[in-house]
Amino acid sequence: MNRPSAAEDPAPGSNHPTRPEDRLPLAEKAGYSAGGMSYTLMGNAIGNMGNVVLNVALGMNPFLVGLLMAIPRFIDALLDPLIGTWSDNCRSRWGRRKPFMFAGAIGAGLFFVALWWLPVTWSESGQFWYFLILSVVFYLFMSLFAVPWGALGLSLTPDYHERTRLMATNAFWCAAAAVLLSWLYALIKLPVFPDSIVGVRWVSAGMAVLMTGLALVAVVYCRERQTAGQATHQPEPVLPQIKAVLANRAFLIVGSIVFFMCLGVFSISSLPTYIAIYYIYGGDEKAASMLVGWNGTVWQVGSLFFVPLVGYAATRLGKRHTLIIALCFALAGNLIKWFCYSPGHPWLFLIPPLFIALGFSALWTIVGSMLADVCDLHELNTGSRSEGALNAMYAWLMKLGTTLAFALSGLLINLTGFQQSLGGAQSGTTILTMRLLDIGVPSAAVLAAIGLAWIYPISENRAFEIRGELERRRGTLTRS
């Protein structure tokens, strides 16, 4: 059989219309998206608040802050493959995924609150170990929810285009949730709180309630789709499943795209805040907090607008072509930062995130849909429907990129020569280095992602061929 390459992907997606039985009801899309909103808040809140609380408010060394952002994610990433394969092998009256999701939702909420009650009178070393231990436990519970939730999304529909619509819906609501993340710094600095420490404690309590509530909505409204054979399939050992996933070239390409994007973005994620405080506003934290809040809001509102556009384009131009075009916009957004970061015109700061938002809207919409296609290819090649293992290794690569990024973030800040004691009197060399790193690091990462997307092998035609072969091989579908 001749198999078309990615370059032969036909432009219009109407050649393969979605079957009525493959369309997901609105309630199920909403339930899955609620889980995505929860995961967005869980996965990013610590990073959004960590530097401004631990470094700026408490004076902790940026290198130690970088370790606190990195070490828990590294440990968490090591556990993801185990959680994924455990959920694949779980046989319970509530299905394979939901027992893990429920436990993760409750535990993550409780430990997120406890995390920010670190004693302010302790030494830097004591505060470091307190935050480290509790954040490790928090991320463990987050993974107990997130890995099975992600695996669930890979099996909700077998249709090539409905997968993109599902992931577009999820990306839209994740962007809506991320608007709140953009304002965490400003919320912590509200005048009603006497200082940042009191502010972060109250804000974390509200965040925990929201995280847990949204996660439980996903537990209630998502239904697991599996074949009759999968429902009675014998458990498989962990290591062979992981080896099989890592032997899948299409999976490695998809995972590496996310790895490089996370590495490039999160390693400099705190730099725009520092640039706003110490370059644009000369050390005025309150003014900078508002600009940073609006910056994130522009990004996320832009994402809300771009997600439907990306979803539509992916069904017309193909997933791979749409992703490459959007990543080119993200590259342009990073390059124009040089002209848009200006003390004389602070609001130019809000232009680059519009371009970058398009790239990330495509990333989270299309890569999730690609991963579901890769899951079909994996089943065809191995005979095993290992959504948990695939999603776990995907999460592992994403967290590996994030872990390395956070470890680098503190080193990069130290590399600039930044000194917290100088306030707004940072040297010109420090500011220049911050600006160059803020442009160069993510631009290199986006270029790597574009190159990987170019060689992604599963075209639309090939995806439908794979589905046809699988349907001839396996039994009827059931839901739990």
Image (cartoon, rainbow, N blue to C red):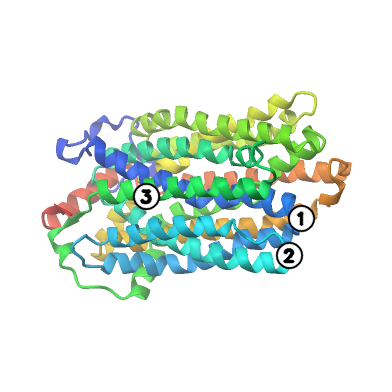
The answer to whether one can see residue 379 in this image is yes
Nearest to N terminus: mark 2 or mark 3: 2
The answer to whether residue 419 is visible is no
Name the residue that disc number 2 marks.
Answer: 124
Q: Secondary structure at mark 1?
A: loop
Q: CA distance from mark 3 to mark 1?
A: 34 Å
In the image, residue 432 sits, relative to residue 114, either above or below, namely above
1 and 2 marks in contact (CB < 8 Å): yes
- Return the disc, 1 or 2, that comes first in the chain's sequence: 1
The amino acid marked with disc number 3 is Ala
Give SS at disc 2.
helix
265 relative to 15, above or below:
below
- Residue to which mark 3 is pinned: 215
Q: Splitting the image into 4 quarters, where does residue 284 fall?
A: top right
Tell me where residue 228 appears, x and y as whole percent: 12, 60
Establish if 10 lies above or below 97: above
Q: Residue at x 50, y 39 (%)?
A: 178
Q: Could you say whether the residue bearing mark 3 is in a helix, strand or loop?
A: helix
**Left or right of 476: which side holds 114?**
right
Q: Residue at x 15, y 52 (%)?
A: 471
Is residue 362 shown left or right of residue 480? right
Q: Position of residue 58 (x, y in %)?
A: 73, 55
- From the top left corner, tell me how far across and down residue 391 is, in percent: 38, 58
Residue type at numbered disc 2 = Glu
Q: Residues within 10 Å of mark 3 (few under 14, many from 20)?
A: many
Residue at 23 percent across and 64 percent down: it is: 383
Foreground disc of the pair 2, 3: 2
Checking the image for residue 261, the label placed there is none
Q: Which mark is residue 59?
A: 1
Q: Residues within 10 Å of mark 1 (few under 14, many from 20)?
A: some
Q: Please state which amino acid type lies under the numbered disc 1.
A: Gly
